[in-house]
Image (spheres, helix red, strand yellow):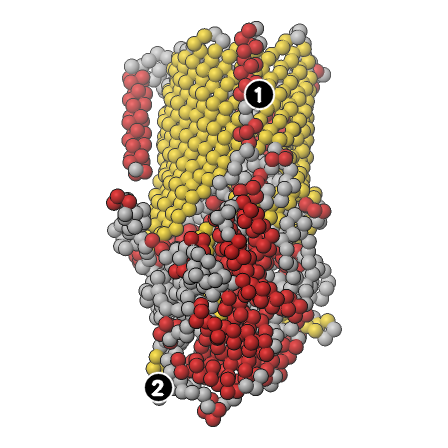
Amino acid sequence: MKNKIVLFFVVLITSSSCSSMLDVDSTRLVSEKNKWTSLEDARASILGVYALTKAALGDYNAHWLYGEMRTGEFISPNRQDLKAIGRNDLNASYPALEALSNWRRWYAVVNSANTFLERIHEIRAADNRYTENTMEVDIAQARFLRAFAYFYMVRIWGDVPLIASSREGNFEDMPKEDGNKILAWVEQELLAAGEKLPYRYSANDEQQQGDYYNENSGRWDGALVRKVTAYAILAHVAAWQSNYADAAAYSKFVLDNYSKASIGYISTSTLTNANGFFFNKNINHLLGFNYDWGHVESSFTGHIEELTLAAPVVDKTVPDMYLPKEVILDVFDEMSDERFSIDTLGNPVTENYFRNFNGRYPIFSKIKCIQGGIADPTFRIFSSATIITRLEDVTLLRAEALAALGESNGAILLLDEIRERRGLEKYTQAVNGDLIDAIFLERQRELMGEGHRWYDLVRYNRIKNNDPDFVNLIQSGGIYWPISKDIRNQNKKIVQNDYWK
Amino acid sequence: MQLKFLINFRKLFYVLSLFSISLCFQLIVNDVNASTLFVLQQDSTSLEKDIENEVDPSGAFVDTVVFIDKKIFTDKPQPISERSLKDISLSPFISLQQLLKAEKAGLTVFESTGEPGTNQHMFIRGISRPLLSKKDSYQSQPLVVLDGIPLIGEHPFSYMIQSYDLERIGTENNLLANIDIDNIESIRVLKDLSTMAIYGPMAANGVIEITSKRNVENNDRRISLNAFSGFVQRPSVTTINGSYENNFRKQFYDLYTTNGKYSDDDNYPVYLGDSLNNAYYGVSNWSDSYYKTSFQHGINGNISGGGPRANFQFALGNIKNSGIADQTQVERYNARFLLNLKPVKWLTFSSMINGNRLDRDRNRNLSSRYAMMSYFPDLSAPLAPNKEIYDSYLAQYDNSFDDNFSNIVEGYVNLKFEFEKFRFQSRIALDYNESYRDVFYSRPLMESNSFASNYYGFNQRLIFDNVASYDWMIDDKNTFYVEAGGKLQWDAHKYNYAYAYKGVNDFIKVNLLDNDPRNGDNPNYLNPTAFPRQLVYKYLDRTRHNLVSFHTQGTYNYDKKYTASVLLRYDGSSNAQPLARWLFTPVVSLGWNIKEDLLKDNSSLQGLNLRASAGRIGVLNQYDDFSQGPNYTAQVGFTGNVTVPGYNGFAVLTRPYESGWVGYDIPWAYSDQANLGIDASWEKRGLYASVDVYLKETKNQLIPIPSLSEYGYRYMHSAGMSVQNSGIDISFGGNIIENNSKELYWKSGLNFSFNSNKLTALPNGLDELVIDGRLLKVGERIDKFWLFENQGIYLTDADVPEFDGKKLAYNGITMKAGDPIWKDANNDQQINEDDRQLMGNIMPKVSGNWYHTVNYKNWDLNVNLFFNLGRQVVNQEMSNRFNFINNEGSKDLSAIKEITYWEKRGDYSKYPIYNPWSSVNAYQTDQDLFLENASFLKLRTVSLGYKMTDKMLSFLNEGASLYLYVTANNLFTITPYSGRDPELVNFLGYDNGNSHIIPKTYTIGFKLGL
């Protein structure tokens, strides 16, 4: 009997000391109670917004399919999904098109910024290493990235839901908001962000003192948004709304102040070198999202190189998309263009933009950051940054604005600023034709492959109004993308864009 | 280091084998006059006797591991309806799944490839959650219990870093290949709560309970030696070449193009474009190198001895299974030791250790390789069908390696204290398995880029378990049994994984690190030396799960006629949320021995039992994310680049936008189950019948609901999905022919089960949900396909119906001549996703087997047929074949052409010639054009055996036995399915054509007992 009592006792002891066994802190994620407590959390959170923006741009190479493939100028030899995009057949059944009509990744950017803006004060209270100044700069960046996400979405879908709080635990399906209202809000947000953003980080800027997160300027140059970035995007927002007066004003701010951000114009060779402008991060990235080779961030996808490069640049027989010879000759119609020009025999003088010009598929190779910026064709991993805007873009945008406003002389000065850097003669109407046409042609040449062309075409046709098909496309909402079925299944308040019904 | 271990293990194995063989030899030579206890079970009747003996509570050493449920129905005739384990053991299979496939009613095994040693999934009584991704099938696996140790399997958490839902990183070895059937006494499939609830929430998907052979304990010794050798037969296939493929494609070009080009930028594949290219247009004899007849073998020695106070058992085994394709094979080395001691009358010590090593040579599929490397090389030139060219490609593997092995160890130490009717049992059990995969692909294999990857992972389970029980004989008629127990369980899963591209040369095949700190000023310390630092990717992940359980059970028996039992459980899981950490679940079981009660005088009826059980069992969360509520992680990658850890070289933290929002409101999921069973057996002709009817509803289950897109999330994890499973398991059989002397009989039995599932509720009151291309609808099955109904082809543009002046459109794309007629199921005059309909089902409605045993004197013949009825398959391979226009430039896994692309499969004539260029994607997989009836009947096993007579064995010791047999497996399949084999489907019910066929095997072997 005694034994039995002892044994029952053993059972009791072994059984009671185990409740704490069930509190297992996951090593795979961070729980709510361990987040928003330290400086490092702040850094991880703000950079998380950047990373999500990069993902939204890179998923299925969306940035280039939206911006380049859709114009139909590039042609895909054998990818049926790209062909469908090229002929504006955006409802076609392909995974890439499904992904491109889904805005979820952009709302991840928005939500992470919203969460950041709501919670960052907790870190300020919890960790006094996190200064008021750093917090202000971080808040400005979060607001910028959120506004940029909305601007991008409005260009793709027209009207989208406007959600400016995280609403955690209280999620609600929201209806679409008028795109113009969103752009007005975006403008306010960008202005507010621009006010707080520094010209540079860790460079004794008066709005960002000391080393930002204890790293020197080399770590941040070209990786983060800056004051001039906000104004560059403001100029784009205004231009998209055909508000060229504001576009001119905002772009002027950039052109007046870029030197404070240590930004300058780049040479043709820097533009086209494998380890040049597009490689890694670069102080001249006015807004760019980098895939830093040294930080093991290079990737197989999320780069235009994946779409455009093929033999002889890389070991791939057929490119996913290429620019046909005739189009190239149309666009690069001036001799001595350092980017691309041909001699009288039809042979290329320079191969900065195109290789294999006389082959079956001319290879668009302006951007070719293979591996660590080398010319090794064997392994197709890329480290080019996704560039949203750079000084040349803002310069030409301002030229466009001035031209649209009738200030031809100012426009020509800016246009020549770019032309001369690319080895071209100064603009003359007699040789180069209409100024607006010349500016857009220059934009096409200079910014080719950077995801601008489609939006340029829309703006061009809004100004010119002379291509009935395109004007009709603009008026009927055909310039927007359809909204993915997945989105409409989840949120019954979202209806398909009219054109795609 | 790993290599060393490998060598040591092999050495140890050989030494031990030699030792045991010499021991056997000595025993034989010395003619040790031992009357062996070991009796070869000749048929299931003798097995039944064994089992009955085991259950008999009088023996001192019965239940080395006590399981209480046996108390409930001691008089239930045990495996009444199944083939004996000896019959099962005549097949040369290595994994538990293969051994049990076609054997147990209610157990469905998906042997989705014939490649030996690969993972196979099994389901008891259907599925209780939809199988949307691989991790759902991990979550639906039954618990396998070896001598009381609930075995731990792989955790699917590594899919987080994988771009494709294909094979899990690591070895993908079948960890349930760790059991040597010759060491096993019984395998029971526990399907209802009365038997499985004792294992707690891990048992929610059913239990497979494996019991080892008991030690000899009567001062005797037993030696057995079992061995087989055999081969797998190369299949005969029809090969095709570029000319065949070109002709196949030509008909599309003839019909839909004028000049051989659909559009100006159309591009005909180069490898088909040149008919003078001998590589593709020449002889197609690659199959001589790909398919091979290969040999396999198995050997197992088992020695046991001792007396009631101390006894042991030691077994060694080695088995090799070979594949017919791609030089695949798996080999297992097994060593097992059991020791029981009874130092004093009231104390029993028992222990077991079971060690296994699995070495597997994997397939060389391109899709697996590219998926692992997450890199697609230029796919424009597929492997050529010519043997010489294929051989030179294979030769490139000579400079590569793919070492893939697992070590698996289970063991327990059990102390049992007995004081008259009171027993206390304390047990520590450990299950540990570790997997290594070291890969190097040399440069020529991928466009002159080498690749190295190293994986190490383990799964570990530690259990501390205490049970106290009391037998209370109130009087002759009333007996009462009560027990209480507590169990602590710690599970851990971990892996380290690294891979690297572009090594400096093909001689350094290991991803070496600079290990010289040089007084701390070496900037390259721990950087890779042979691979570029920027192309080395490293991962490690770990997850833990702790489980605490208490239970108490009382069983009352009246006069061996009526039994009633109540089991109450209280389980706490660390994967449950803090506010809902514990779950209380009751189970009630009743038994009625009708024979004993009412029909005692009926001499022809041997037994008649009625069983009933009802209750609840918890269902565990698979991931620890759910216990944390809203959380943060680093999911900032994108399609094709999923493992981005940060931005600008800094780690980031964001909400889990990819895996989905997890809130604070997640309760335990549980399953309510009821089962009613009846078992009967008759004297005459050994007739038996057993029927079980069941209903179970698994409630409160978590499901990721696609929602919150405007908040960035892909899913919201919500609890509240309920799935109902219902069905009947039936077995019956008896002797069709028997003569009086029992020298000749023909016994036959049929096991089959009907199973159905139904979605009864979705979270948040939803009544349907579209997720990952599947529709889940309340009231419908959860394993249905969601497809367009195909009604033919529009031959001309005029055939396309017009509504209000607008031609019928698919997703807004106007249909044209050459497009398929998809039924406008909802009559809204347009074709889109809403017109897809639920049809077919992945899980069979009826499955079972039909076995025969013919015995004549010392000869016996076993035949086992098995069947699945009411089941469909989507023939994705045919869809891919016809969809060549889209696949030629695609970077999709399904577009990769394996060498088997040059094999003629399927029936092309079944499919209309659509316009493959059309944007409606005419040959998309998700239409019933590719849905086929995949019912089948297979001849799983035929074996013929001869038991040597005592006379013949007179030169051996008395009581020696020797059984010789030949076996053939998988001889034929009868099916309407036009693909290769209706079993070769993935968990989505798709046959993508990449798996190896299940080979025909031929085996000859013997079983010797001394």
Residue B676: % across, % down: 68, 29
Residue B926: % across, % down: 59, 57
Q: Which amino acid, by three-letter code, is at mark 1? A: Gly
Looking at the rendering, in which quadrant would you find the N terminus of chain A? top right
* Chain hosting mark 2: A
Within-10-Å neighbours for mark 2: few <14, some 14–19, many 20+: few
* Chain hosting mark 1: B
Residue B694: % across, % down: 67, 33
Secondary-structure class at tag 2: loop
Residue A248 seen anywhere in this rendered image of the structure? yes
Above or below: residue B649 compared with residue B115: below
Q: Nearer the viewer, residue B848 or B361?
A: B361
Picture residue at 57% right of the left edge, 50% below the top? A121
Q: Nearer the viewer, residue B689 or A177?
A: A177
Query: Farthest residue in the front direction?
Result: A206
Residue B140: name its quadrant.
top right
Using the image, tell me which numbered label, if any, was put on residue A64.
none
Picture residue at 35% right of the left edge, 12% below the top? B33
Quick check: A467 left or right of A394? Answer: right
Residue B218: % across, % down: 43, 11
Q: Which amino acid, by three-letter code, is at mark 2? A: Asp
Q: Which residue is mark 2?
A: A343
Question: What whole-number distance in Å separates the C-alpha atoms at marks 2 and 1?
Answer: 90 Å
Secondary-structure class at tag 1: strand
Residue B851 seen anywhere in this rendered image of the structure? no
Q: Which residue is mark 1?
A: B485
Within-10-Å neighbours for mark 1: few <14, some 14–19, many 20+: many
Above or below: residue A423 compared with residue B563: below
Above or below: residue B971 compared with residue A231: above
Picture residue at 35% right of the left edge, 58% below the top? B446
Above or below: residue B727 compared with residue B768: above
